[in-house]
């Protein structure tokens, strides 16, 4: 059974069509309806639709544009076009976009029936073909890039294959490599300029860098590439032979050939670094490994290149390093300023936002003085800061992602200390704003609780009982109330008591001493004195007046 999507901005057209047409005769069990192109795309994202029937003339997105977008995502989805225009140009455009049928309004039910019968039979034939060997091979070819990527990732992560099994896989995946063949590895990291972009943009940059690298390396080597679990680009290179090596002359003898190949890969790696900076306006760091065999050495080659890459930050333009050449050992030092008192947790707890920012600037300066500025130092800074941000959010009974937004919580590493401190300052500003808003709301709630408690407990009221009710210190309660209300708590309580006294004197038969008792005064004489001080007359005089 199949599902169909009807699209028309005139709702009565598809509503009538849904009711009047015998869909079940054509093995269509479910009908989806959309009244615009955007709504249709949304339905297609969430539903398994087998056929689309759409009007051509719709506002915002017409039927041809809708079909173009459908075909871009699902090229085999049959689309039938409805229109009131019997013009050749429309038919030509419809054919260009892969429309299976072009039906004119008002709709001829018999033509629609014939079209649906033909389309449904075609779909069912495609389903039968999908079970065939040819369809399986098409699926294999479609997934071949991801299969190659996965195999290379398995090899650099240390997965072992027997020689025959590995050679079979290499041959099956059309990779011109051999288990015992000599290879070299190039590891590439995109630096700060690229990582500031969105994930989708970063993937486009990775694709561009991969194309540039393959174009260069393919002049001298067979190339096999993948993206590793750190989002670095890995290129495995096998010399393509003297005829393909741009650095080898016909007169080169065999003893000169390895040296020529080494020089060629070094030159191409440097050219890759230059071209990416020149054409994509962003830096990459490139590590060229030592040589080794594919089956036995690839894991060690990758680990050495990875270690070298993590020991140095690219700082904008990136750098090139060949592990075939000797290079000095690193002098690693600790970034002590991260752990100086007061801690970041304490600064956030006590609301020392300015001091926190000053510490960030000192960290940036301290990082710049390190003899070796490594990726691990950046990881260390990020972990300490992110830990402090999580701490203060959780202490305020909230998730960090709820306070600052999920998109601000980093999911990957930073490529420079400036990028990291910029992020931290933005996080700090956002946290401060949200926590101060939350604190203000909580304080207003405390004031409301105090007022409610005062009104309900005038007969037995004290500062301590109010403080106990809101679970705060009495001194803080008095200070907070004065700050928000502009009068002291005792002045507010007096005003509430006097308002109630006036009401009781006017609207009840209670005697003065009874009113005094209800207001919580120890004796009526004191109540009379307070009343006279407030209104210039005794309660009895007020009642008689």
Image: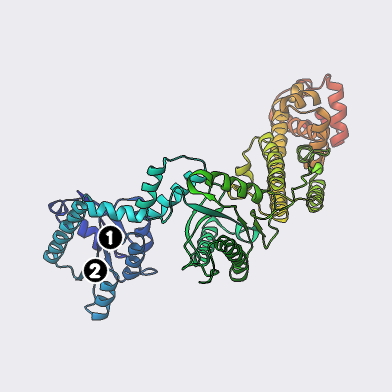
* x then y, percent, for residue 449: 69, 32
Image check: 236 left or right of 283? left
Q: Secondary structure at mark 2?
A: strand
List the residue tagged with mark 1. Answer: 76
Q: Residue 398 lies in what quarter of the image?
A: top right
| Colour theme | rainbow
Which tag is nearer the camera, tag 1 or tag 2? 1
Horizontal relation, residue 393 to residue 69: left or right: right
Task: Please report the residue visible at 83 percent of the width from the left and 21 percent of the height from the top.
Answer: 524
| Disc 1 to disc 2: CB gap under 8 Å | no
Instruction: Tell me the quadrant of the picture where the C terminus can be found.
Output: top right
Residue highlighted by disc 2: 82
Sequence-wise first label, 1 or 2: 1
| Residue occupying image coordinates x 51% and y 43% | 296
| Spot occupied by residue 471 in the image (x, y as percentages of width and height) | 73, 26
The relative height of residue 297 versus residue 15 in the rendered view (above or below) is: above
Task: From this view, report whether residue 467 is shown above or below residue 312.
Answer: above
Whether residue 172 is visible to the viewer of this picture, yes or no, is: yes
């Amino acid at each position: 059974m199949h599902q169909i999507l009807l699209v028309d901005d005139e709702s009565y057209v598809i509503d009538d069509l849904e009711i009047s047409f015998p869909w079940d005769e054509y093995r269509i069990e479910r009908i989806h309806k959309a009244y615009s192109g955007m709504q249709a795309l949304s339905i297609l994202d969430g539903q398994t639709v087998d056929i689309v029937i759409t009007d051509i003339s719709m506002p915002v997105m017409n039927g041809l544009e809708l079909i173009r977008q459908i075909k871009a995502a699902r090229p085999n989805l049959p689309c039938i076009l409805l229109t009131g225009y019997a013009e050749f140009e429309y038919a030509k455009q419809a054919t260009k976009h892969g429309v299976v049928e072009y039906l004119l309004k008002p709709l001829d039910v018999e033509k629609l029936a014939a079209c649906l019968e033909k389309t449904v039979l075609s779909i069912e034939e495609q389903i039968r073909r999908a079970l065939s060997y040819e369809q399986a091979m098409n699926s294999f070819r479609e997934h071949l890039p991801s299969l190659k990527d996965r195999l290379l990732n398995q090899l650099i992560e240390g997965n072992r294959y027997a020689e025959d099994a590995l050679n079979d896989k290499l041959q099956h995946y059309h990779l011109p490599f051999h288990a015992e063949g000599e290879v070299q590895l190039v590891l590439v990291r995109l630096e700060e300029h690229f990582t500031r972009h969105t994930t989708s943009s970063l993937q486009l940059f990775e694709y561009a860098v991969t194309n540039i690298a393959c174009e260069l390396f393919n002049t001298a080597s067979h190339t096999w590439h993948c993206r590793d679990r750190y989002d670095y680009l890995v290129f495995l290179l096998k010399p393509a032979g003297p005829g393909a090596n741009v650095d080898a002359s016909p007169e080169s003898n065999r003893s000169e050939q390895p040296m020529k190949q080494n020089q060629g890969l070094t030159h191409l790696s440097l050219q890759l670094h230059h071209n990416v900076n020149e054409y994509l306006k962003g830096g990459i760091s490139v590590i060229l490994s030592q040589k080794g065999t594919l089956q036995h050495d690839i894991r060690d080659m990758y680990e050495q290149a990875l270690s070298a890459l993590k020991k140095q930050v690219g700082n904008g333009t990136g750098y090139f390093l060949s592990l075939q050449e000797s290079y000095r050992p690193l002098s690693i030092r600790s970034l002590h300023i991260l752990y100086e008192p007061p801690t970041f947790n304490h600064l956030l707890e006590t609301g020392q936002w300015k001091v926190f920012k000053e510490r960030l600037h000192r960290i940036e300066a301290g990082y710049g003085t390190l003899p070796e500025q490594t990726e691990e130092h950046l990881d260390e800074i990020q972990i300490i800061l992110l830990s402090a941000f999580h701490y203060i959010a959780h202490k305020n009974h909230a998730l960090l992602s709820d306070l600052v937004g999920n998109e601000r919580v980093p999911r990957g590493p930073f490529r420079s200390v400036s990028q990291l401190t910029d992020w931290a300052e933005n996080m700090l500003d956002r946290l401060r704003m949200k926590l101060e808003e939350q604190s203000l709301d909580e304080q207003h709630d405390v004031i409301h609780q105090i007022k409610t408690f005062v009104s309900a407990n005038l007969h037995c009221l004290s500062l301590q009982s109010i403080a106990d009710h809101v679970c705060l210190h009495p001194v803080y309660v008095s200070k907070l109330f004065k700050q928000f209300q502009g009068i002291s708590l005792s002045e507010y309580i007096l005003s509430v008591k006097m308002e109630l006294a006036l009401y009781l004197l006017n609207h009840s038969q209670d005697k003065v001493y009874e009113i005094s008792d209800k207001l919580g005064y120890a004796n009526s004489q004191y109540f009379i004195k307070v009343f006279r001080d407030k209104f210039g007359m005794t309660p009895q005089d007020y009642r008689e007046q």
